[in-house]
Amino acid sequence: MLLERGPQHMRGGNTRHTRDIRLAHASPNAAASGAYPEDEFYADLLRVTGGETNELLARRTIRESIALADWMAEQGVHWQKPLSGTLHLSRTNGFFLGGGKHLVNTYYDTAQALGVQVRYDVTVHAFEVSGTRIDRIVCECDGREERFACGATVIAAGGFEADIDWLRTYWGDAADHFRIRGTPYNTGIALKALYDAGAKPVGDPRGLHCVAVDARAPRFDGGIVTRIDSIPFGIVVNSAGERFYDEGEDLWPKRYAIWGKLIAEQSGQAAYAIYDAQAADQFIPSAFRPLSAPSIHELALLLDLNASVVVQTVERFNAAISAAAIVQMDRLDGCSTTGLVPPKSNWAQRINSPPYYAYPLRPGVTFTYLGVEVDATARVSRVDGDAFENGFAAGECMAGNILTRGYMAGFGLTIGSAFGRIAGSEAAAYARA
Amino acid sequence: MLELDLTRELDRQLSVCNACRYCEGFCAVFGAAQLHSAIGSGEVAYLANLCHDCRMCYDACMFTPPHEYALNIPAVMAEARAQTYAAYAKPALLATLFRMPRRAAALSVAASVVLLAVGVALYAGPQALRPQLGPGSFYRILPYIALLTGPLALAVFGLVSVLQSARSYARDIGDGVRFATAASLLIAFHDAFSLVYLKGGGAGCYDENRGSGRRRFFHGLVFWGFLADFAATISAALLQDVFVQLPPYPLWSVPVVLGTGGGFAIGVGAAGLIAVKRRSDKRALSQQMVALDYAFLSLLLLAAITGLALLAFRSSGAMGTLLILHLGAVAGLFITAPYGKFVHFVYRFIALIKNAHEQRAAKAGDPSS
């Protein structure tokens, strides 16, 4: 029996929004090119987490990922070449045809063909426990409370990023300006229920992965199409019209993830990415068209900013760059501003070719890091030092054991898939025993 | 040329697709859309006909209704295709037939049957209800000259009409670029004959739930069946006019084998396509296009069934009646051809040529891709 929190069209949580999965492999396979050995994969993980990970679980995930390319294909998943604009991932990541919702649909087809019964719109909000055993799952469906006795249970309930009140406990009123990029059903109810049942938390409760998204994005579920890729091509100002961070610090995929937090720290959690005609069409656009105007002054008025301050910011930025600067976007080109605070260390090119464009920005939360501790069999640890004998966790609600901070493209799905299979087979083995 | 609302709507929806790109692997539409960031009516006509209606993007899309982005690419594309057909119909006066495909099909068959019946009654009289055997049996029911000139006139009219539509469409989507180069034609031929975009990048086309290969299979049957029947007609003409053998031909002759095989293929293919369509997800289609589909497929099915029946009972007294019905069905197909779903392959083929051309140009311009 599968209890899904959302309705059928939203099933599968934020897997719906994925498009690729990071896979270790010794030689080219159907999913990815070249080789991506375990040690390199692990070294990449250490780099993004600053060395803070559970090595046992991390290595188990990476080793399990080797078999995933074939296993996923067996479930009916088709591999395809990397999507345009993602060539840098072709060696480390496999792209599945049609993206995450197609993947989820395929998995549901398989599950239902195997006889798994699926119930939608069911909110699991408590676990009845005796000793280290979860006896029953308490949930609400159609306004009624129901209890399911279980031999074993796998909790794959995601993070809590869609519970704004919960976010507010760490972020205050700033949370009201966050956009939640994925499902509105990741409200952490099952996570809380696990804690109430004695599960041991893991991960920084404040920790959230947050990128710059278009301020016009819907409050929830705006998905990948609201992300703003224009930042290294121009400048970013806050609502005072001032620049506040080096837009050319590092290659974009690596820096992509810091901008959400940077914007969250600005007044009103608002910022504005500004670029000119030279940069237009050079990056993947947002689903919303940029605002545009023939002059910076008029652009600033469109954005409801103090126009003279913005004009001054752009003039100062332009004055700090040699007129002859020709930027090379494919590498750290060293074209930097001189004497400007904060600097733009790469790709600094004068903003002087009308029309001028701008995207209004807000922090867009992708996921939270808080979860429950698990062991290598995916069993949920208890605060009293034991583990639940029949309670397993997979996916975002335990990913914080491994990805403690930072971001690696396609790794969330690797953890979800690897631990989903581990949890599933351990749960089945327990229930049958 | 096309309705402004539809152009705006496709522009709105594709701006989400261009930011997402998850569906790139299904077909050529999404790669092509990335090359056209501003959508005008020419782009709509181009992209809509590049779409092969596999509907996999609907199954895969996170942003279909009730999501507030409310994307439904297959439905908009189908709507736009139906509009393309009407917008480029020649003479423009007859474009109105696209809005009433069922009636157009039924009326053209009925009128043809009546006309043929009257002609047969006047020419053959009660002979038409008696078995006719031996060489030239058909011509004792209807004169050879009528059997030759009737279909020929309809075919020439249809061909001229469709060619004019094609030229005007190619000019509009070409935007001043001569895209029909040898290389792009070759790629387009491959894409068209292999029906590669009915493969959905491996996922197949719409079916009961997820994709399957059935639609491509049935479409292939209709297509090759159609070609076989065309070849049967040519071979019969050669037998009669070059080798001076009058029909009917024996069961194991070239025209009968080709015609029977083609008839079976068209019948099974059309019935299969109708079945697949009937059980598909009704949210991802355009009512107007579905009406066009059913009208065309029904005519194909009718022509196939009457043709096979004619073969089966050609030595009986029913031959005259079946000949009238079969010729009526075929005439219905011919009459509605330039004003029904038949034209889809013309626009789609031109769109494929343009796509082949601009993808080659884009690759040449960008060595990294």
Image (spheres, coloured by chain):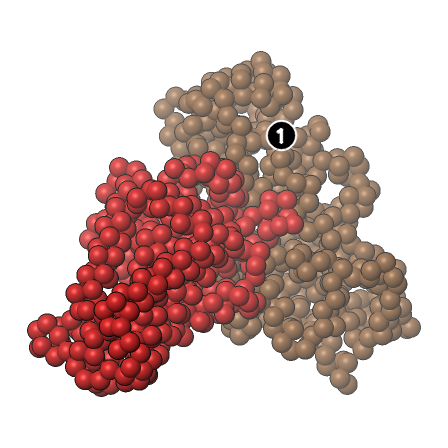
Chain colours: A brown, B red
Q: Is residue A309 above or below residue B185?
A: above
Identified at 70% across, 28% down, the residue is A267
Q: Is residue B261 left or right of residue A59?
A: left
Q: Is residue B273 left or right of residue B149?
A: right
Query: Residue B254 placed where, x, y %?
Result: 20, 80
Name above or below for residue A362 compared with residue B69: above
Give coordinates of residue B63: x percent, y percent.
59, 50
Taking the view exactly as shown, the residue that stands out farthest to the top is A308
Chain on which label 1 sits: A
Percent across and percent down for residue B110 are: 38, 62
Q: Residue at x 59, y 46 (%)?
A: B70
Say which of B294 and A315 sits in front: B294
Whether residue B206 sits left or right of residue A371 in the image: it is: left
Q: Is residue A167 left or right of residue A51?
A: right
Quarter of the image where one finds residue A381:
bottom right
The residue at the point 70 percent across, 65 percent down is A394
Residue at x 81% of width, y 46% of height: A166
- Quadrant that contains the C terminus of chain A: bottom right
Q: Nearer the viewer, residue B301 or B32?
A: B301
| Residue under label 1 | A271
